[in-house]
């Protein structure tokens, strides 16, 4: 659906040039929810804004649904933009229009006949659950409701792609959840491709199929969300995951710990780790002390993390770890005492 | 009445303008009406041009939807130059133009020319300020939907800036009342002429005070209407 190759963006400012994107290449498949995560200033917004050419790339090309967006003239670009929806952190609703007319706006631009457009708006209001707010003005809506209007507006022209620039960053966790649920629902119902950017790993965890980690203007890791959660390949990815799945073991625990070998066991899916661990204890002559544990869900799959202290003879511990490996668990040796 | 006079002989103009026998309240009424007429028409005309100019100033500015450095700086300089001329000098400078346009440089209709011309750059800057207050995100949202420049102006910039533009209209109108009184002193008609002729030239201070009171009432009324309209525009549905 999206094919970005060698995308470079340099902002020219009077004092110096800012390299915001450095030869970024990325593919987003049709129908998936793709997340881009990165710290503030990493270049996320720049990247997503290049996709509908709100920002003009300095170099590189972007293909959206077979169309080379970066090569279009002004007129063609306007046509293509009608088929790419976008939602924003600050919602960007027109305060001069009520909810109904805000959703009507893109349909006016694409010159949909009024009667048809009105019907479409009613449909959209239903999809986002705001039928009763049709005549209300944006300043009387909560943040979550505003974003629902934003989503309805972005869907009005039946886009094939939805771009979301930190759409939930101004919302509380509860509202974020409900907006993400709505996005997931739309994605499934309309087979709409969604590209979202965020600095919040929770967002990625809740809805994304795949994720790209962007750091310092570069994409440092791309892959399946579950895979990156269980086995982050870069320090940046690791720190994002740590931000929501506490993997760092509190310093005191490490100090109080006397003899054993600390390992971290990660497991994904229903092959929950505990039965394997109890059979390990039975088979090998080691003791396992659970120091820290947590089970979370990534998208819809359980994802767990245990930190164990293994005590016993060195050889037995080695064997035990090997056994866990063989059972398909992800093991990391944390600390040798 | 003013077509009778062609030369700038102010004194005889004042005499023939008011006559000496007319009843004072009637003179006051006529003068008030002339002021309203003069100010209303020049406000209207200055907005026709000033709105367009203000919009062009905004959309051609840096990083805006029709960025155009040369257009922007040329228009900007013209606006600044006109705005830096004191109105009283401006009045005299445009006399030749007024003569060409109206046929005379004295009287209510003639005053509309300098009033409008002086107000246009002022209005342009007010409109520019109003439009620049609009959050850029709204323009971007419209761009992301494929809106063209015209749609952004008519569907985003102007409607969103409406409350602030309405306040600007009130400010402009009030300024023009002041300017019209100045124009009145050099034969522009309206309350300015009345105050000057009776109050200053004939030492009838009571007349001067009465015109001042009428002016105060006018200004208050316009500000009130402006505030109310702006409020209505920004608090829809409440
Ligand atoms: N218009 C601009 N002019 C100059 N520099 C810019 C501009 N926009 C962004 N930048 C710079 O480009 C870099 C990337 O910015 P970008 O907005 O893409 O980051 P981001 O990942 O979206 O960050 P955040 O999470 O804070 O939104 C930053 O260093 C930023 O300062
Ligand atoms: Mg950003």
Image: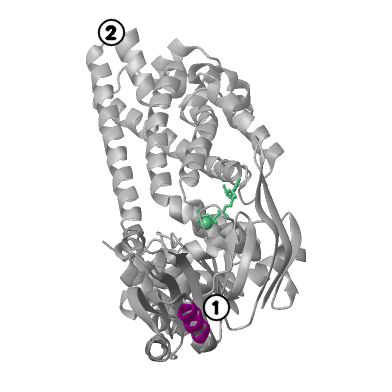
- To the question of a shared chain for discs 1 and 2, the answer is no
Q: Is residue A162 above or below residue B4?
A: below
Residue ID at (32%, 18%): B195
> The residue tagged with tag 2: helix, strand or loop?
loop
> The residue tagged with tag 1: helix, strand or loop?
helix
- Please state if A176 lies on the left or on the right of A110 as rendered: left
- Mark 1 Cα-neighbour bin, 10 Å: few <14, some 14–19, many ≥20: some
Q: Given contact means CB atoms under 8 Å apart, are the residues at marks 1 and 2 in contact?
A: no
* Quadrant in the rendering for residue A262: bottom left
Residue matched to label 1: A227
The quadrant in which the N terminus of chain B is found is top left
- Closer to us: B91 or A188: A188
Q: Which chain does tag 1 point to?
A: A
Read off the magenta span: A315-323
Residue ID at (45%, 22%): B183
- Mark 2 Cα-neighbour bin, 10 Å: few <14, some 14–19, many ≥20: few
Instruction: Say whether residue B31 is magenta.
Output: no
Between the C-alphas of marks 1 and 2, the distance is: 94 Å
- Please state if B44 lies on the left or on the right of B181 as rendered: right
The quadrant in which the C terminus of chain B is found is bottom left
Q: Which chain does tag 2 point to?
A: B
Residue matched to label 2: B203
Magenta stretch: helix, strand or loop mostly: helix
Give the percent coordinates (x, y) of residue B111. Answer: 49, 27
- Closer to us: B131 or A65: A65
């Amino acid at each position: 659906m999206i094919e970005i190759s060698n995308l470079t963006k340099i902002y020219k400012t009077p004092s110096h040039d800012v390299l915001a994107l450095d030869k970024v290449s990325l593919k987003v498949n049709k129908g998936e929810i793709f997340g881009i995560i990165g710290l503030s200033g990493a270049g996320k917004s720049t990247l997503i804004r290049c996709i509908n050419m709100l920002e003009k790339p300095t170099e590189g090309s972007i293909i959206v649904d077979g169309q080379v967006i970066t090569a279009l003239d002004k007129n063609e670009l306007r046509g293509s933009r009608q088929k790419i929806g976008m939602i924003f952190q600050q919602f960007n609703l027109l305060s001069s229009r009520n909810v109904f007319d805000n959703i009507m706006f893109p349909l006016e631009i694409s010159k949909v006949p009024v009667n048809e457009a009105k019907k479409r708006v009613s449909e959209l209001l239903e999809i986002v659950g705001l039928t009763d707010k049709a005549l209300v003005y944006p300043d009387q809506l909560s943040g979550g409701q505003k974003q629902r209007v934003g989503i309805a507006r972005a869907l009005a022209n039946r886009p094939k792609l939805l771009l979301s620039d930190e759409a939930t960053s101004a919302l509380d966790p509860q509202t974020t959840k409900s907006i993400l649920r709505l996005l997931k629902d739309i994605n499934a119902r309309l087979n709409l491709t969604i590209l979202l950017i965020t600095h919040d790993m929770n967002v990625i965890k809740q809805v994304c199929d795949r994720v790209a980690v962007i750091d310092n203007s570069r994409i440092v890791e791309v892959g399946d969300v579950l895979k990156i959660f269980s086995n982050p390949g870069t320090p940046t990815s690791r720190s994002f995951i740590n931000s929501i799945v506490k993997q760092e073991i509190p310093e005191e625990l490490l100090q109080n710990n006397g003899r054993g070998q600390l390992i971290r066991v990660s497991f994904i899916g229903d092959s929950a780790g505990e039965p394997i661990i109890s059979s390990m204890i039975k088979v090998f002559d080691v003791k396992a002390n659970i120091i820290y544990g947590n089970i979370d869900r990534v998208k819809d799959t359980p994802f767990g993390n245990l930190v164990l202290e293994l005590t016993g003879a060195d050889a037995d511990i080695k064997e035990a770890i090997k056994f866990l490996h063989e059972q398909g668990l992800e093991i990391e040796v944390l600390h040798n005492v | 009445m003013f077509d009778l006079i062609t030369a700038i002989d102010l004194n005889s103009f004042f005499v023939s303008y008011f006559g000496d026998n007319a009843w004072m309240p009637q003179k006051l009424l006529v003068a008030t009406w002339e002021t309203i007429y003069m100010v209303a028409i020049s406000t209207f005309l200055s907005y026709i041009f000033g709105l367009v100019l203000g919009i062009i100033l905004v959309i051609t500015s840096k990083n805006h939807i029709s960025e155009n450095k040369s257009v922007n700086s040329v228009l900007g300089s013209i606006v600044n130059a006109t705005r830096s001329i004191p109105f009283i000098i401006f009045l005299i400078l445009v006399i030749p133009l007024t003569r060409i346009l109206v046929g005379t440089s004295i009287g209510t209709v003639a005053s509309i020319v300098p009033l409008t011309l002086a107000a246009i750059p002022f209005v342009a800057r007010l409109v520019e300020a109003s439009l620049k207050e609009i959050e850029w995100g709204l323009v971007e949202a419209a761009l992301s939907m494929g809106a063209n420049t015209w749609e952004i102006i008519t569907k985003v910039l102007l409607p969103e800036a409406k409350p602030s533009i309405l306040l600007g209209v009130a400010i402009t109108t009030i300024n023009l009342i002041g300017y019209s009184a100045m124009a009145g002193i050099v034969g522009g008609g309206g309350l300015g002429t009345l105050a000057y002729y009776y109050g200053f030239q004939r030492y009838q201070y009571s007349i001067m005070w009465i015109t001042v009171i009428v002016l105060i009432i006018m200004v208050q009324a316009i500000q009130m209407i402006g505030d109310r309209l702006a409020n209505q525009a920004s608090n829809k549905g409440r």
